[in-house]
Image: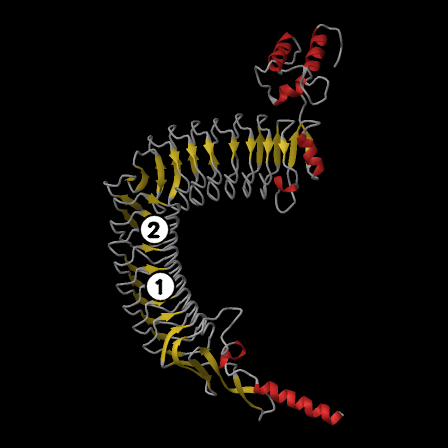
Amino acid sequence: MKRIISVLTGLCMFTAFLCVPAAITAYALDTREGGVRVTEKSGTCGDNITWVLDTNGTLTISGSGKMYDYDKDNPTPFLGDYYPYIKKIIVQGKVTHIGDRAFDSCSDAVTVTLPDSVTSIGYRAFAGCCEMTSFKIPSKVTVINNEAFRGCDGLTSLTIPKGVTSIGEWTFSGCGGLTSLTIPEGVTSIGEFAFDSCESLTSVSIPNSVKGIETQCFGYCSNLKSVTLPDNLEFIADRAFTDCTNLKSIKIPDSVKWIEGSAFRKCSSLTSVNIPANVYLIGNWAFAQCPGLTAINVSAKNAKYTSIDGVVYTKDKKELEIYPGGKKGAFTVPSTVTHINKYSFYGCMGVTSVKIPDSVWRIEECAFWECENLTSVFIPDSVSAIDNGAFAHCTSLQTVNIPKGETAISDFVFEGCTSLASVNLPDTLIGICKGAFSGCTSLKSVTIPESVIMIQERAFENCKKLSSVTILNPECQIAEGKNTFTSQGDFFIGVFHGYEGSTTQDYAKNNGRGFVALSNPIPGDLNSDGKIDVTDLTILSVHLLDKNELTAAARKAADVDSNRNVDLADLAGLRQFIAKKIEEF
């Protein structure tokens, strides 16, 4: 019986071997050195295409038609554990399509040869082939798909044939060795990030057939010095040339209609820019953090924008749009301006002081963010709105006056203003919002007026030198948690000053902070004149009729029954005291 079973088992194994499909990879194994290694590998990669990987590391693709497309879940059969053996790739015969991910991450391949029959190169077909130094794209290729050559950082030269009409997204992104490039006439679209981070690219000429420079198409090309834009260009998308730090000049064609956000951000060598007549949109940060940029000049024929001394405004001069980052010294905002728009001074290293006229009523979000050399700014009382992050990270800002019209210090307005040593808060203020003074490491003391009813989380976080905090409103709502006031981490070196029984005392107790009581107002003495009389009774009566607001001190004095509410019971008690019907409250 055992012998029969053994024979049957052998027959099953032999039958299974015979049933292996022809498309399955075949291996020849060599065990001469005691281990198993591949000496030859072969299989199919298309309906009419075969491949062989020989012992010298040459991968040969032969046949006709399209190679199969592959993906992460269905990788090419000749890669996997064997791709380090591939040193040379030869595609021959009448192959028309190089499949998606066909040679993805074939990082040791030095040379690639393709036949003239190829018309399309698939998604990530040669991505990560980082040892490849040159590549000839066949003349019949019309489409180069997304990421086809992404990360081929050894590639130094490349010729794109005239028949190509489309270059996909990320196609040559990260080809750090590529030094020059000519894009042929006939190319109508260049995808987003197509040449992103081509750090050695020094010049590029874009044909007239291209209508737009897409998102981050040439972003982070740090050695790009010369760019020729087509005469028919309509738009420059967001981050198109961001961080092109050696780009000294750019001629924007008259045909351009819009320039999106961060298009030329951090182009630190750019010195001047001319905005043509047809531009109707310049996005946020379009020319931000360009420390060499001293002027942005707008065509007099432009219907949307105008410029004065290199500073960009709306055509009616009511909104300040862009201040060039390299324009140095003090600046006075023109009296026509009512708005300082968001990001308008963002990252301007040259401006040292700003005087804002009383025509201005709003300073928008992040307007002066990271103006690191700005030491002072005058804000008139006409300003009633200072939006989030308006002066954040102005690390040289030492003094600032907060206008009386301001009712709230918005989120992160003065975050990271590390030189700000003192601040005077107006008695019109009712709220200090999240992170308003976080990271103000030179701030030593602050008195929060009795008008303030709310202090939000992180308002004074990481204020390393803040040793004294006085909160005059005994009922001010202070955000729970230690991070509202900290010196570093959860630790706080300072002491809180407030009234006995106040929310300030509660906050200090709950968070292990020091507390010193302020002198409490005399119960019933609402006007703090040292007497309790009919004047105090009148003030309380008018308040209860909703005709006036009491100050924090007056509210505390009016609460004669000490129940933290000011109501008719307090009015009755005060009347009895003044009539000498009671001797104390």
Q: Could you tell me if the residues under marks 2 and 1 are in contact, i.e. CB atoms within 8 Å?
A: no
Q: Residues within 10 Å of mark 1 (few under 14, many from 20)?
A: many
Vertical order, 309 against 475 (above or below): below
Q: Residues within 10 Å of mark 2 (few under 14, many from 20)?
A: many
- First in sequence: mark 2 or mark 1? 1
Residue 361 seen: yes
Q: Hey, what amino acid is under mark 1?
A: Ile
Q: Quadrant of the N terminus?
A: bottom right
In which quarter of the view is residue 109 placed? Answer: bottom left
Give the label on residue 300, or none.
none
- In the foreground, 55 or 65: 65
Q: Position of residue 479 (x, y in %)?
A: 63, 36
Which of discs 2 and 1 lies nearer the camera? The answer is 1
Q: Hey, what amino acid is under mark 2?
A: Gly
Task: Give the structural element (helix, strand or loop) at label 1.
Answer: strand
Vertical order, 24 against 275 (above or below): below
Vertical order, 395 against 66 (above or below): above
Q: Position of residue 31 (x, y in %)?
A: 58, 91
- Decide if residue 171 is on the left or right side of residue 298: right
Q: Position of residue 200 (x, y in %)?
A: 36, 66
- In the foreground, 157 or 271: 157
Q: Which residue is mark 2?
A: 292
Give the label on residue 167, or none.
1
Q: Residue at x 49, y 75 (%)?
A: 76
- Decide if residue 148 is on the left or right side of residue 541: left
In which quarter of the view is residue 33 placed? Answer: bottom right
| Tally of marks | 2
